[in-house]
Image: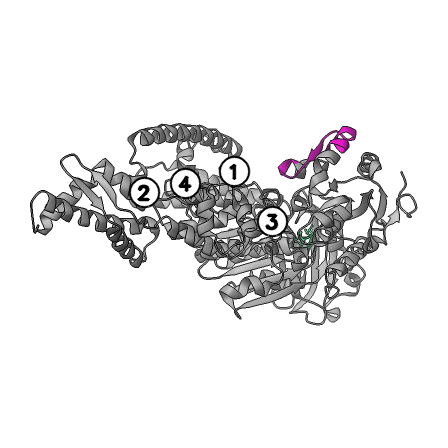
């Protein structure tokens, strides 16, 4: 009904056509946008729109939903879960009922209510008959037991009190959310984004919210949650995408990644820039037809000092350098042509004349070249001499790790490119197009890209119009025009993604323990207000450059000004599985405590010989749900092939395909942050040996399952896995 009303409102507004004063037109567009957004939200949140009811002593009966709705008389029909009056739905307890007598969870499928669970909070306020129908945590347990789809779902209906405190925490400052596997860090972080956008809409819509995740597979896994909560304007990114125009997905070897993430690299990059400003000690002759000029080392020294003292980034300081050299050359030229003293105008004329001379330009380019971050970095990696100078603080072995000729950009290059961009500054557009041939080529390429984009947008626009039944009132071309970038309709998230110097309104970092010190440096540039939510688990750090303690990574930026919340309950991994993982956790650090699991699965974790893997996978598929084999990186290909031969449709490696396939074989880094119904971990000892952080990767692998866990191995298991029972001897299964 409401959707129909919104749709007809949108039609009415659009049908008024683009006539009238400028103000009329812009009002019309604003209303059209508003109704279109509302329509999009109503479609997106249809699943489980209403999920709760509060019987409140003062407010009466309140229905809680994914968004707020009012009727024609402005009576509220549904309260948005993020509104302050909805808070007791998540926080009220019998000890502190917050004015609530009863909390009711409504489970829906499509538009039908399929289940009702009540929490009684005030025994005196409820009738005898109602008491008989109450049952506590059923809604939560039902949600946790559901089969996984390969995509994360929202949890609005069952947010728990400790999670709600994190979601509604103050916007300002740095909040660290530390929690073991399955404690809901990711899902809570996403709900926090939705809550913050609702509560501080104006500020955050303008500056945008950035959510940083560990890899693209993970972003695909979570990307549905915010739209299902009615929020679409958030930028999801990995570190590899933080540098506009680049999508670095390649990974360096662990030692190289660790070095590139090391904070010492900031100085290496700074020296690499200085290296390009070094002065040579021999005079340089410039034959100019009628006479020859000489660039003396003294001139270079003076020009360089002036440029450095200007404190501008390299590319902007070049103007100072060039001017100083040209002035000196102009004076020299004046002498040569018999003029003693020259006035300012004459000096300027001579300078401009010299500027156009090819030999002069070549010399200036050599002494102070325009540099892009890419060129600087490739020049550094490609030259042992440049590395010796710039990375003199590193050992020869470390320098060797950085050597590379060309090749793909990796994720760990991105913070270095960003560092370089800061020091180099922008290059003037005109200069970039200086070479005519290059400019022609660029233009042709840009035209072609634009044409492709236009076609894609047009197709998309037609689809949208058809879906929403609006094709009669708005032509596809016009909608496509609005969608396309460049105009005022570019969303905040799109503008932010294209701008390296964008300052976000809030940044959320997931799996934050994986970020290197250099990546933190890059990230902090994007958020000068330091309004951040950082979620992660120090015990799960897998990358060698990752964090060992939150203070280590945060104190350099916000010493004494960050606060920490802990999540302690594991909603993913059943008790039996967590007992196995907890033994491994103890080998990482006996002080660490595993989170408490809320449910039992009844399935005993098992072990079996590796050669049986294809059969084991088949058996697990038979049990139902999504089955994933987590393997040491070196075995992913081989094991993937053997499983795929036995079980058609098996996906090998990470990526979106792995999320959608019923069976997948992947490495630990790709499984990070994800969850599956059944997990088989292979060769745990090899996972430990090959990981930069010993047992942390194994701990991650063992905590991915929501129902069943097995280990397939040839090598001995080691004492930490002594709880596993040989498959077939356990109470639940046998081949
Ligand atoms: N309150 C809740 N209601 C229903 N499901 C929940 C709740 N909290 C967490 N979950 C579910 O528990 C699972 C684990 O959550 P999530 O992936 O956010 O945990 P995590 O702390 O990020 O784990 P990891 O550290 O392993 O990445 C998800 O399926 C999530 O939907």
Residue 451: image quadrant is top left
State the residue position of label 4: 13
Residue 521 locus on image (x, y percent): 49, 56
Asked if marks 4 and 3 touch (Cβ < 8 Å), the reply is no
Relative horizontal placement of residue 615, taking residue 187 as reference (left or right): right
Q: Residue 366 carries which label?
A: 2
Q: Which of marks 2 and 4 is in front?
A: 2
Asked if marks 3 and 1 touch (Cβ < 8 Å), the reply is no
**Residue at 56%, 42% in the rendered image:** 43
Q: Residue 408 carries which label?
A: 1
Residue 489 locus on image (x, y percent): 40, 42
- 641 and 266: which is toward the camera: 266
Label 3 sits on a secondary structure element that is: helix
Asked if marks 2 and 4 touch (Cβ < 8 Å), the reply is no
Relative horizontal placement of residue 545, taking residue 373 as reference (left or right): right
* Ligand 1 has an atom within 8 Å of the beta carbon of the residue at disc 3: no
Question: Tell me, what colour scheme is on the image?
Answer: one colour
Q: Which of marks 4 and 3 is in front?
A: 3
* Ligand 1 has an atom within 8 Å of the beta carbon of the residue at disc 4: no
Badge 2 or badge 4: first in the primary sequence = 4
Asked if marks 1 and 4 touch (Cβ < 8 Å), the reply is no
State the residue position of label 3: 255
Work out which quarter of the rendered image holds the N terminus and state it: top right
């Amino acid at each position: 009904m409401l959707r129909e009303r919104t749709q007809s409102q949108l039609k009415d507004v659009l049908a008024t056509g683009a006539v009238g004063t400028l103000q009329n037109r812009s009002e019309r567009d604003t209303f059209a946008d508003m109704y279109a957004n509302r329509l999009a939200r109503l479609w997106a949140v249809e699943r489980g729109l209403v999920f709760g009811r509060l019987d409140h002593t003062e407010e009466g009966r309140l229905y809680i939903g994914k968004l707020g709705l009012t009727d024609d008389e402005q009576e509220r029909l549904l309260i948005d879960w993020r509104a302050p009056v909805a808070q007791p739905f998540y926080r009220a307890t019998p000890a502190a009922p917050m004015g609530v007598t009863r909390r009711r969870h409504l489970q829906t499928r499509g538009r039908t209510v399929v289940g009702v669970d009540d929490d009684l909070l005030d025994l005196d306020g409820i009738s005898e008959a109602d008491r008989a129908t109450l049952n506590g945590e059923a809604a939560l347990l039902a949600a946790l037991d559901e089969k996984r789809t390969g995509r994360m779902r929202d949890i609005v209906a069952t947010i728990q009190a400790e999670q709600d405190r994190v979601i509604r925490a103050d916007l300002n400052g740095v909040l660290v959310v530390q929690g073991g596997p399955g404690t809901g860090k990711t899902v809570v972080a996403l709900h926090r984004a939705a809550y913050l956008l609702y509560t501080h809409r104006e500020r955050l819509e303008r500056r945008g919210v950035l959510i940083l995740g560990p890899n693209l597979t993970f972003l695909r896994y979570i990307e549905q949650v915010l739209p299902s909560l009615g929020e679409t304007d958030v930028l999801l990114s990995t570190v590899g995408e933080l540098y506009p125009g680049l999508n670095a997905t390649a990974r360096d070897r662990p030692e190289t990644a660790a070095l590139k993430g090391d904070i010492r690299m900031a100085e290496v990059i700074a020296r690499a820039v200085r290296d390009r400003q070094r002065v040579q000690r021999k005079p340089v002759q410039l034959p100019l037809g009628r006479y020859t000029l000489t660039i003396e080392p003294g001139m270079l020294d003076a020009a360089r000092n002036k440029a450095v003292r200007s404190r501008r980034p390299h590319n902007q300081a070049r103007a100072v350098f060039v001017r100083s050299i040209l002035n000196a050359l102009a004076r020299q030229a004046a002498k040569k042509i018999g003029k003693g003293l020259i006035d300012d105008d004459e000096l300027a004329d001579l300078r401009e004349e010299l500027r156009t001379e090819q030999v002069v330009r070549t010399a200036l380019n050599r002494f102070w070249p325009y540099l892009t971050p890419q060129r600087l970095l490739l020049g550094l990696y490609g030259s042992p001499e440049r590395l010796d100078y710039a990375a003199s603080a590193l050992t020869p072995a470390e320098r060797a790790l950085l050597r590379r000729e060309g090749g793909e950009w990796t994720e760990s290059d991105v913070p270095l490119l960003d560092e370089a961009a800061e020091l180099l500054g922008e290059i003037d557009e005109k200069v970039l197009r200086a070479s005519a041939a290059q400019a022609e080529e660029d233009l042709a390429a840009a035209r072609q890209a634009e044409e492709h984009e236009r076609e894609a947008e047009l197709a998309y626009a037609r689809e949208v119009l058809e879906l929403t039944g609006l094709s009669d009132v708005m032509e596809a071309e016009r909608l496509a025009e609005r969608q396309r970038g460049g105009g005022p309709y570019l969303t905040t998230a799109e503008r932010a993604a294209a701008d390296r110097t964008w300052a976000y309104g809030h940044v959320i970092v997931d799996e934050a323990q994986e970020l290197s010190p250099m990546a933190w440096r890059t990230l902090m540039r994007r958020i000068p207000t330091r309004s951040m939510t950082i979620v992660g688990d120090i015990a799960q750090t897998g990358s060698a450059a990752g964090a060992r303690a939150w203070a280590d990574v945060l104190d350099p930026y916000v010493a004494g000004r960050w606060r920490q919340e802990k999540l302690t309950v594991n909603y993913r991994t059943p008790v039996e599985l967590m007992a196995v993982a907890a033994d491994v956790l103890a080998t990482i650090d006996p002080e660490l405590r595993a989170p408490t699991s809320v449910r039992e699965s009844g399935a005993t974790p098992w072990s079996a010989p590796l050669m049986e893997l294809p059969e084991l996978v088949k058996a697990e598929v038979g049990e139902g749900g999504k089955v994933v084999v987590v393997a040491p990186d070196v075995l992913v290909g081989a094991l993937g092939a053997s499983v795929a031969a036995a079980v058609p449709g098996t996906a090998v490696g990470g990526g979106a395909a792995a999320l959608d396939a019923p069976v997948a074989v992947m490495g630990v880094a790709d499984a990070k942050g994800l969850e599956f119904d059944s997990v088989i971990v292979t060769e745990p000892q090899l996972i430990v040996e090959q990981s930069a952080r010993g047992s942390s990767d194994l701990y991650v692998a063992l905590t991915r399952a929501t129902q069943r866990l097995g280990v397939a191995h040839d090598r001995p298991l080691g004492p930490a896995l002594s709880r596993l029972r040989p498959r077939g001897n356990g109470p639940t299964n046998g081949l």
